[in-house]
Image (tube, grey):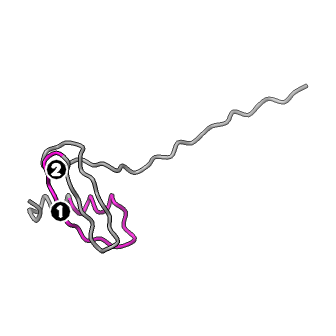
Amino acid sequence: MGRKRKKIVKLHRRRLPTIYLCPKCGEESVKINVEKKPNATVTCGKCELKAAISFHPYEKPIDVYCNFIDKYYRGEVV
């Protein structure tokens, strides 16, 4: 007699996005380029919105995007 086979369940891990929403034009076209320097450049492909955001080495690109959004709504990025 054979044993009952166990069902294998694969877990799909979510990944962080690489392209984000632009606060100015509303399109999903913001790309973040993290450099080795303590600055990251945030650019929108549609409306050409650009900003240089400083970050710490332990931060991820999503943290840079959140700082960019905060500065945009404060009026520091135009």
Residue 56 at x, y = what percent?
A: 33, 73
- Residue at figure coordinates x 24%, y 63% from the top left: 41
Which quadrant of the figure contains the C terminus?
A: bottom left
Q: Is residue 64 left or right of residue 9?
A: left
Relative to 71, is 20 above or below?
A: above
At a point 36% along the width and 67% down the height, the residue shown is 59
How many C-alpha atoms fall within 10 Å of the one at disc 1: few (<14), some, or many (≥20)? some
Q: In the rendered image, which quarter contains the N terminus?
A: top right
Measure how far apart labels 2 and 1 are at the Cα level: 13 Å
Q: Amino acid at mark 2?
A: Pro
How dense is the environment of label 2, judged by Cα within 10 Å: few (below 14), some, or many (20 and up)? some
Residue at (13, 58) in percent of width and height? 73
Q: Residue furthest right?
A: 1
On whether residue 20 falls in the magenta region, the answer is no
Picture coordinates of residue 71 (x, y %)? 16, 63
> Which of the two labelled residues, at mark 2 and mark 1, occupies the earlier sequence position?
2
Amino acid type indicated by mark 1: Ala
| SS at circle 1 | strand
The reply to whether the magenta stretch includes residue 49 is yes
Q: Which residues are magenta?
A: 46-68
Q: Pointer 1: what residue?
A: 51
Residue corresponding to mark 2:
23
Q: Which mark is residue 28?
A: none
Tell which tag, 2 or 1, sits nearer the viewer.
Answer: 1
Secondary structure at badge 2 equals: loop
Q: Position of residue 65 (x, y in %)?
A: 27, 58
